[in-house]
Amino acid sequence: MVNKILLIGPPGSGKGTQGIRLSELLGLEHVAIGDLLRAEISSGSELGETIKAKVAAGELVDDDLILGLIETRVEEAAEKGYILDGFPRSVDQAKKGRKLAEPVGARPELVIYFDVPDDIVVERLTARAEIEGREDDNEQTIRHRLALFHETTKPLLEFYEKQGKARTIDATAPVDEVTEKILELMRG
Ligand code: AMP
């Protein structure tokens, strides 16, 4: 079974939920870049201050900073296998990530693309805002994050399709079904 997995999809497509479930089921490292950034922000560090405004506005944080977060985890991830949610978010980031991953054998084996129509994303995130109170889950920022996703992140689908690694799933299906589908794809 493959054990180096990228989860790619628009905000609110369920990557976070599936990442947690799969890592618990399979004992893989679960790395969610957004969670790492939010932890840094709540720590009140200087670095947190720098990224706070970008995350709140739904903008991408600088590549160097993100690559720094990836770099410290890449060897362990190569060894244990990983579920990575939130990286890469652009083809540029993917190319930079490849330079870190290749030497230690950490390149992804399978890329799951979570397909969800925009109107469902907006609906889900608006509901999540009431439960989790994330600062970036307001309608204006949601729309901006979605536009950024289409422009910058979605081209990764073609990038990984060309490498024969990408599989698209219907992420509007019930949570259990999505998990089952991903497990099926991992088994190959
Ligand atoms: P998420 O929890 O994945 O929705 O990420 C929340 C926010 O963190 C995003 O809207 C970005 O501001 C930032 N972020 C997460 N991953 C990345 C990344 N790979 N590159 C740049 N910014 C990121």
Image (tube, rainbow, N blue to C red):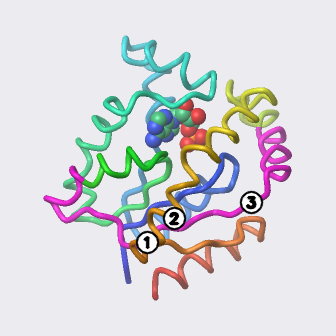
- Residue under numbered circle 3: 116
Q: Could you tell me residue 163's position as x and y percent?
A: 39, 72
Q: Which mark is residue 76?
A: none
**Tag shown at residue 162:** 1
Task: Bin the neighbour count of mark 2 within 10 Å (Cα to Cα): few under 14, some 14-19, many 20 and up.
Answer: few
Q: What kind of element bears circle 2?
A: helix
Crowd tier of the residue under label 1, counting other residues whose Cα lies within 10 Å: few below 14, some 14–19, many 20 or above: few
Q: Can I make out residue 153 in this image?
A: yes
In three-dimensional space, the C-alpha distance between marks 3 and 1, rounded to whole angstroms, equals 22 Å
Residue 106 within the segment the image draws in magenta: yes
Q: Residue furthest bottom?
A: 188
Q: Position of residue 141 (x, y in %)?
A: 72, 28
Q: Which mark is residue 158?
A: 2
Q: Quadrant of the N terminus?
A: bottom left
Give the residue displayed 36% in from the left and 62% down from the top.
82
| Residue 11 in the image: above or below residue 170 | above
**Vertical position of residue 74 compared to residue 116: above or below:** above
Mark 2: C-beta under 8 Å from nearest atom of ligand 1: no
What amino acid is found at the position of numbered circle 2 in the picture? Glu
Q: CA distance from mark 2 to mark 1?
A: 6 Å
Q: Residues within 10 Å of mark 3 (few under 14, many from 20)?
A: some
Judge by depth and name the residue closer to the eye, 159 or 2.
159
CB of mark 3 near ligand 1 (< 8 Å): no
Q: Is residue 169 left or right of residue 30?
A: right
Q: Which residues are magenta?
A: 99-128
20 relative to 43 in the view: left or right: right
Amino acid at circle 1: Lys
Mark 2 and mark 1 in contact? Answer it, CB < 8 Å. yes
